Amino acid sequence: FNSSADANLKSESPNKNFGSAITMNLTDTRDGMVRFDISAIPSGSTIASATLTLVATSVGSATSVKNYGAHRVLTDWVESTTTWNTPGSTAGTHFASSATATTAVSTTGLYTWSVTGDVTNFVNGSATNYGWRIIWSSNTSGTNEQVDFGTKENATASNRPVLSVT
């Protein structure tokens, strides 16, 4: 599945929309949002695996490992209007406090998060599919060095977010 919506959220511009950006420019004060339309999967299907793949097109420092968590979003949002403040940035209210999965990023390239449990819950109706918020959790240098992940607007198709479901 290709992403149906994605956006960059910036705490320093809390009311500005970055839904049409070609990258999610993520730091300790900037998050990303991504959602996929998986309505083609029949309700009750058994999900053997589900993997979220993002492509890091740029990293702030190749010597610094940056950890990013995929947190299930708990409230609805629209790509063209979402901001840091809308739907909000409160853990436990607007997105799950704990990451579904965390991935260490150090260089440009493909990175994956196992989101099988979330997709299973979306398909069986026990959770609503609002996608994931990608949040910086730590890095080895102690700085907020950024990582840029491609969005669905990225000119290079292979840099766009993908959800693989078996």
Image (tube, rainbow, N blue to C red):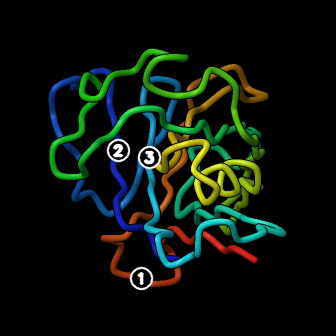
Q: Is residue 29 above or below residue 155?
A: above
Residue holding disc 3? 130
- Residue shown at 80% from the left, 67% from the top: 49
Q: Can you name the residue that lies furthest to the right here?
A: 48
Instruction: Residue 34: give x, y in percent of width and height.
Output: 45, 53
Residue holding disc 1? 156
Residue 86: image quadrant is top left
Which tag is nearer the camera, tag 3 or tag 2?
3
Instruction: Indicate the secondary structure of the residue bearing disc 1.
Output: loop
Q: Is residue 93 above or below residue 83?
A: above
Q: Amino acid at mark 1?
A: Thr
- Residue shown at 47% from the left, 32% from the top: 74
Which is more N-terminal, label 2 or label 3? 2
Which is more N-terminal, label 2 or label 1? 2
Mark 3–mark 2 distance (CA, rounded to whole Å): 15 Å
Instruction: Residue 131: give x, y in percent of width and height.
Output: 49, 49
Mark 3: give few (<14), some (14-19) or many (20+) Cα within 10 Å: many
Instruction: Residue 29: give x, y in percent of width and height.
Output: 44, 24
Residue 35: image quadrant is bottom left
